[in-house]
Image (cartoon, rainbow, N blue to C red):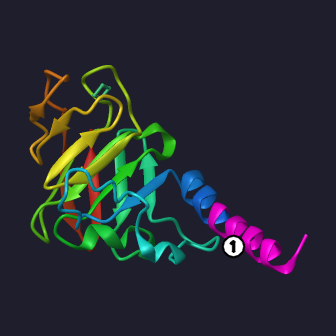
């Protein structure tokens, strides 16, 4: 194996390791700046280096309550308008979006079409379920089928930079 192949493989493993870490954390990162519906810019938050390194976790799921430390680098995408997260940790199955810089809305990530939970993107202020293409606005309302029912919404509150989502 030549040196070029060795480096390529090393780079690959580095990237795969990051992806595995975020998958283990149950976090999918996506920035909300995508303007084209066909721009599948879901490769995520380039701040991916902001993992916890074994320290505190950005997201805590306890029963029906999910808490997100908004100051944590793992969830930095949520600090800006249009930033969003899909939270699969502990089967929380939550979509959360920063509406205007300080207002958050959270929804079930169980698509009301046939129940896909983890194939979401966010583009042009719409959540898109990539299983069959249903789209939902930032109020959880269906804007395009095949889904016919809105996404259930969860309560949100922010105190001391902690976003609490209550089912
Ligand atoms: Fe979401 Fe079909 S499960 S569109």
Residue at 12% over, 63% down = 103
Query: In the depicted view, which residue is nearer to us: 118 or 133?
Result: 133
Looking at the picture, does residue 96 appear above or below residue 117? below
Residue at 38% over, 39% down = 93
In reply to whether residue 10 is colored magenta, the answer given is yes
Dividing the picture into quadrants, the one containing residue 19 is bottom right
Looking at the picture, does residue 150 appear above or below residue 128? above
Q: Position of residue 83 (x, y in %)?
A: 25, 64
Q: Position of residue 20 (x, y in %)?
A: 63, 56
Residue at 31% over, 66% down = 31
Region of the chain picked out in magenta, as a range: 1-16
Q: Quadrant of ligand 1?
A: top left
Q: Residues within 10 Å of mark 1 (few under 14, many from 20)?
A: few
In the rendered view, does 92 fall on the left or right side of 149?
Answer: right
Looking at the picture, does residue 78 appear above or below residue 165? below
Residue at 50% over, 76% down = 50
Dividing the picture into quadrants, the one containing residue 132 is top left
In the rendered view, does 32 fall on the left or right side of 71?
Answer: left
Q: Extreme right residue here? A: 1
Quadrant housing the N terminus: bottom right
In reply to whether residue 26 is colored magenta, the answer given is no
Looking at the picture, does residue 34 appear above or below residue 94? below
Query: In the depicted view, which residue is nearer to us: 148 or 160?
Result: 148
Instruction: Give the residue at mark 1.
Output: 11
Q: Secondary structure at mark 1?
A: helix
Dividing the picture into quadrants, the one containing residue 119 is top left
């Amino acid at each position: 194996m030549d040196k070029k192949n060795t480096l390529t493989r090393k780079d690959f493993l580095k990237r795969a390791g990051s992806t595995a870490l975020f998958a283990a954390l149950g976090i999918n990162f996506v920035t909300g700046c995508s303007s084209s519906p066909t721009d599948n810019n879901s490769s995520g938050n380039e701040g991916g280096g902001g993992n916890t390194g074994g320290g505190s976790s950005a997201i805590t799921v306890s029963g029906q309550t999910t808490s997100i430390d908004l100051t944590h680098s793992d969830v930095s995408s949520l600090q800006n308008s249009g930033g969003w997260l899909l939270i699969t940790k502990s089967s929380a199955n939550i979509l959360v979006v920063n509406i205007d810089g300080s207002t958050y809305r959270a929804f079930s990530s169980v698509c009301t079409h046939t129940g896909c939970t983890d194939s979401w993107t966010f583009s042009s202020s719409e959540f898109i379920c990539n299983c069959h293409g249903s789209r939902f606005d930032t109020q959880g309302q269906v804007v395009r089928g095949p889904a016919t029912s809105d996404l259930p919404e969860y309560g949100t509150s922010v105190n001391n930079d902690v976003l609490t989502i209550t089912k």
